C-alpha cells in the first residue's frame, strides 16, 4: 500500500462520516492524484486555475474539483464550465461574475462564502458587515446561477490553538447567523469548510463539515 493510499484510509477512518474530505492536490502531479483516486478519494482542491486546467483533462472525469484559492475575475470563465464548487467567493463582484458566466453555459455553480476570520490581513474574505449588507439588500439572493452552500475560511497560521479554536468558533457563529437570517429555507446552505492539515482536528471539534487536507495526504510540498 502506498503512503498516499495509507494516508487517505487513515484520515477517512478518523473523520466523522458527516465531514467531507477534500484532498488538496496543488503542486502535485497527476500520478499522485490518481493514487488518491484509486484509494477512493473523489474530491480534490486546487488553488490556481491554470494548474487545475493543466491537470484535469489527464484525470478521471468523475473527479469533483473544488477551487479553494483566490479566484481572479478574468479566470472565472475557464472554471465555471466544469467546477464542482468554488469555495473562495470573497466578494460580491466575484459572485456576480460567476453567476454571469454560469448563466452563459447553463449551469448552477455551488459556492461558499469566504469569511475573513484570521488575524492576518493578507488572507481574503468578506467581513460579516459587508456580507450582511449584500444579503439585506437581496443582491446575493437574487443571483440565480449560483447556489450558496455555506461558508469557508482559513484560521491564522499560528501554534496558538486557543486562537485557532476561537476563530473556528467565530466562523461557526457566522454560519448560524447567516442561516437563521437569510438561508433558513435553503437546504443547500449546510457547509462549514474549515480545517487544514495542521488544524483539522480542532476544526472538526468546532463543527466543520468539510476539511481541506494536502500535506497529510501527499506529503510536504
Image: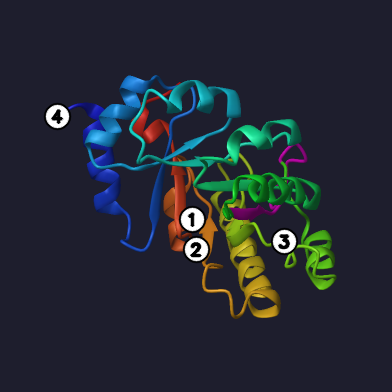
Q: Which is more toward the observer, 59 or 163?
A: 59
Identify the residue at horizontal 68%, vertical 44% (top origin).
Answer: 101
Q: Which is more toward the observer, 198 or 86?
A: 86
Mark 2 or mark 3: name the one nearer the start of the chain. Answer: 3
Judging by the rendered image, the residue that carries numbered circle 4 is 1
Tell me residue 27's x, y (percent): 48, 21
Measure the alpha-carbon separation of dots 1 and 2.
5 Å
Mark 3 or mark 1: name the one nearer the start of the chain. Answer: 3
Judging by the rendered image, the residue that carries numbered circle 2 is 206
Q: Is residue 118 magenta?
A: yes
Find numbered disc 3 in the image and state the secondary structure of the residue it sits on: loop
Q: Nearer the viewer, mark 1 or mark 4?
A: 4
Find numbered disc 2 in the image and state the secondary structure of the residue it sits on: loop
**In this picture, which residue range is highlighted in magenta?**
111-123
Tell me residue 200's x, y (percent): 45, 49
Q: Are marks 1 and 4 in contact (CB under 8 Å)?
A: no
**Residue 143 marker:** 3
Q: Quadrant of residue 72?
A: top right
Measure the alpha-carbon separation of dots 2 and 3.
30 Å
**Residue 203 marker:** 1
Measure the alpha-carbon separation of dots 2 and 4.
32 Å
Measure the alpha-carbon separation of dots 1 and 4.
29 Å
Up-down relation of residue 51 to residue 36 (above or below) = above
Magenta residues, dominant SS class: loop
Tell me residue 118's x, y (percent): 69, 48
Q: Nearer the viewer, mark 2 or mark 4?
A: 4
Q: Quadrant of residue 115?
A: bottom right
Mark 2 or mark 4: name the one nearer the start of the chain. Answer: 4
Residue 168 visible at all: yes
**Crowding at label 1, few (<14), some or many (≥20) Cα neighbours within 10 Å?**
many
Find numbered disc 4 in the image and state the secondary structure of the residue it sits on: loop
Q: Are marks 1 and 2 in contact (CB under 8 Å)?
A: yes
Amino acid at each position: 500500500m502506498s503512503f498516499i493510499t495509507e494516508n487517505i484510509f487513515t484520515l477517512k477512518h478518523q473523520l466523522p462520516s458527516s465531514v467531507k474530505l477534500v484532498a488538496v492536490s496543488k503542486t502535485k502531479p497527476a500520478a499522485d492524484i490518481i493514487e488518491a483516486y484509486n484509494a477512493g478519494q473523489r474530491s480534490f482542491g486546487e488553488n490556481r486555475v491554470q494548474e487545475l486546467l493543466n491537470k484535469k483533462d489527464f484525470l478521471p472525469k468523475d473527479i469533483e474539483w473544488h477551487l479553494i484559492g483566490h479566484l481572479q475575475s478574468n479566470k472565472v470563465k475557464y472554471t465555471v464550465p466544469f467546477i464542482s464548487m468554488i469555495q473562495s467567493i470573497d466578494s460580491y463582484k466575484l459572485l456576480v461574475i460567476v453567476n454571469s458566466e454560469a448563466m452563459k453555459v447553463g449551469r448552477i455553480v455551488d459556492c461558499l462564502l469566504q469569511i475573513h476570520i484570521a488575524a492576518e490581513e493578507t488572507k481574503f474574505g468578506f467581513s460579516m458587515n459587508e456580507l450582511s449588507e449584500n444579503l439585506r439588500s437581496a443582491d446575493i439572493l437574487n443571483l440565480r446561477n449560483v447556489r450558496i452552500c455555506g461558508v469557508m475560511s482559513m484560521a491564522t497560521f499560528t501554534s496558538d490553538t486557543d486562537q485557532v479554536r476561537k476563530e473556528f468558533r467565530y466562523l461557526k457563529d457566522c454560519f448560524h447567523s447567516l442561516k437563521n437570517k437569510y438561508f433558513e429555507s435553503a437546504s443547500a446552505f449546510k457547509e462549514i469548510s474549515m480545517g487544514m492539515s495542521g488544524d483539522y482536528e480542532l476544526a472538526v471539534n468546532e463543527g466543520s463539515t468539510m476539511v481541506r487536507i494536502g500535506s497529510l495526504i501527499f506529503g510536504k510540498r
